[in-house]
């Protein structure tokens, strides 16, 4: 049996020796070996500690406290070193695959196409007035696209909407969304309030103002007393909201569409000059936005609605035109060329 001070010295020696080894070790295997050489069952420290039981209570206490402190210090240092070595290892592996000096890859956040943004805005605005969204097929029959809307086979107004017939005089890509009016009136009973956005096609020579495919939105309201005042009110409030401009006023100008009587062109105060007159509105102070009118009684009869009981209005326009007016864009083809230099300017219209 050692003198207590000798035992303490021996333990202290092991402490110093282990801490030094831990400090200089450079891999996890060595750390494991150090651990085993200190704490292994028949190893130095364990043997020395097994001596403690031979001492008196006072010494046992002193030796116990001291040896616990030493054990804790050694295990703490082992753990600390192990964590450090593991971290170094991971970093080393990472360095093999990642060049940290390379510039990072930044995410290019895209945006919604300006026409889709406008359609969303139109739809949301009309939904607010209780309109529901309707749709119809892009490939239509002549009857839905023309005849039911009072455009008989030889009607001269068909010229304005020349298209590509798929089967002669029978099936065609729709030339306007007005066909959705007919489909809705056949499938729903009045009262009706719908907004129908969608693609339409025409046989056009493409230029600044024309493309063979473009978008339209169609509105239809049928009820017992629906009148022109309602049409003007709803459109004025909606356009104020769509253009986010309280100053906009509308003007109804007499026009002709075979499916409405009376028919109008809807003009709005020029957004750029607020009606004063400028280059954009050709000094008129007004810009043409869409077509509208009270549904022709014959169209109502064509879909089995009694014109003595019900009446209503319809309107139709192009979202492209609204985006162009709002952003002073002068070439409609830009929307379809997919040039990101153009499109990315409209994160929010
Ligand atoms: N369908 C017409 C066009 O494509 C626009 C239009 C005019 C729609 C008058 C309507 C309307 O609903 O009442 O040019």
Image: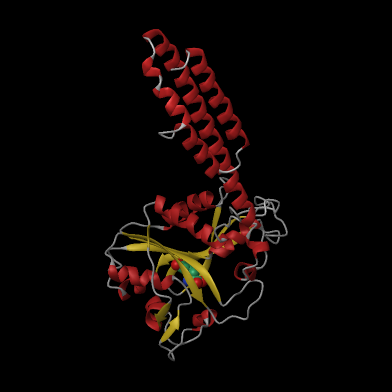
Image quarter of the C terminus: bottom right
| For residue 299, side relative to residue 213 (left or right) | left
Residue 269: give x, y in percent of width and height. 61, 54
Q: Residue at x 59, y 52 (%)?
A: 93
Residue 202: give x, y in percent of width and height. 53, 79
Q: Residue at x 64, y 68 (%)?
A: 334
Residue pushed farthest top? Answer: 58
Residue pushed farthest bottom? Answer: 168
**Observer-nearest residue: 310 or 45?**
45
- What sort of colour scheme is used for the picture? secondary structure
Image quarter of the N terminus: top left
Q: In the picture shown, does residue 199 fall above or below 26? A: below
Q: How many labels sit on residues?
A: 0
Residue pushed farthest front? Answer: 1
Q: Residue at x 62, y 81 (%)?
A: 205
**Observer-nearest residue: 286 or 83?**
83
Residue 273: give x, y in percent of width and height. 68, 51
**Observer-nearest residue: 39 or 340?**
39
**Observer-nearest residue: 15 or 187?**
15
Residue 141 figure quarter: bottom left
| For residue 118, side relative to residue 129 (left or right) | right
Residue 10: give x, y in percent of width and height. 52, 21
Residue pushed farthest right? Answer: 279
Q: In the picture shown, does residue 53 fall above or below 196? A: above
Asked whether the viewer can see residue 131, the reply is yes
Q: In the picture shown, does residue 174 fall above or below 117? A: below
Asked whether the viewer can see residue 262, the reply is no
């Amino acid at each position: 049996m050692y003198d207590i001070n000798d035992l303490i010295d021996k333990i202290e020696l092991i402490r110093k020796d282990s801490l030094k080894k831990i400090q200089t070790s450079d891999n996890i295997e060595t750390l494991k070996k150090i651990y085993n050489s200190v704490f292994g069952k028949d190893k130095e420290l364990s043997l020395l500690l097994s001596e403690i039981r031979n001492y008196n209570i006072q010494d046992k206490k002193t030796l116990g406290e001291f040896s616990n402190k030493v054990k804790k210090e050694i295990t703490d240092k082992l753990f600390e070193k192990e964590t450090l070595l593991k971290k170094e290892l991971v970093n080393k592996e990472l360095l093999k695959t990642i060049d940290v000096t390379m510039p990072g890859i930044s995410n290019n956040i895209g945006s919604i196409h300006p026409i889709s943004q406008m359609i969303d805005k139109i739809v949301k605005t009309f939904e607010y007035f209780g309109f529901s969204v309707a749709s119809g097929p892009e490939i239509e029959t002549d009857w839905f696209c023309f005849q039911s809307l009072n455009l008989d086979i030889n009607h001269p107004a068909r010229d304005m909407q020349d298209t590509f017939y798929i089967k002669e005089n029978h099936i065609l890509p729709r030339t306007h969304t007005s066909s959705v009016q007919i489909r809705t009136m056949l499938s729903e009973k009045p009262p009706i309030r719908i907004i129908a956005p969608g693609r339409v096609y025409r046989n056009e020579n493409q230029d600044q103002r024309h493309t063979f495919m473009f978008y339209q939105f169609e509105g239809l309201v049928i009820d017992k007393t629906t009148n022109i005042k309602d049409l003007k009110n709803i459109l004025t409030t909606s356009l104020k909201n769509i253009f986010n401009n309280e100053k906009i006023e509308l003007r109804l100008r007499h026009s002709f569409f075979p499916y409405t009587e009376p028919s109008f062109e809807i003009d709005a105060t020029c957004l750029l000059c607020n009606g004063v007159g400028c280059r954009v509105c050709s000094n008129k102070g007004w810009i043409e936005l869409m077509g509208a009118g009270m549904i022709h009684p014959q169209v109502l009869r064509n879909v089995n609605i009694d014109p003595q009981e019900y009446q209503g209005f319809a309107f139709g326009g192009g979202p492209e035109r609204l985006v162009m007016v709002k952003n002073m864009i002068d070439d409609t083809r830009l929307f379809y060329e997919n040039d990101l230099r153009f499109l990315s300017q409209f994160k929010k219209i």
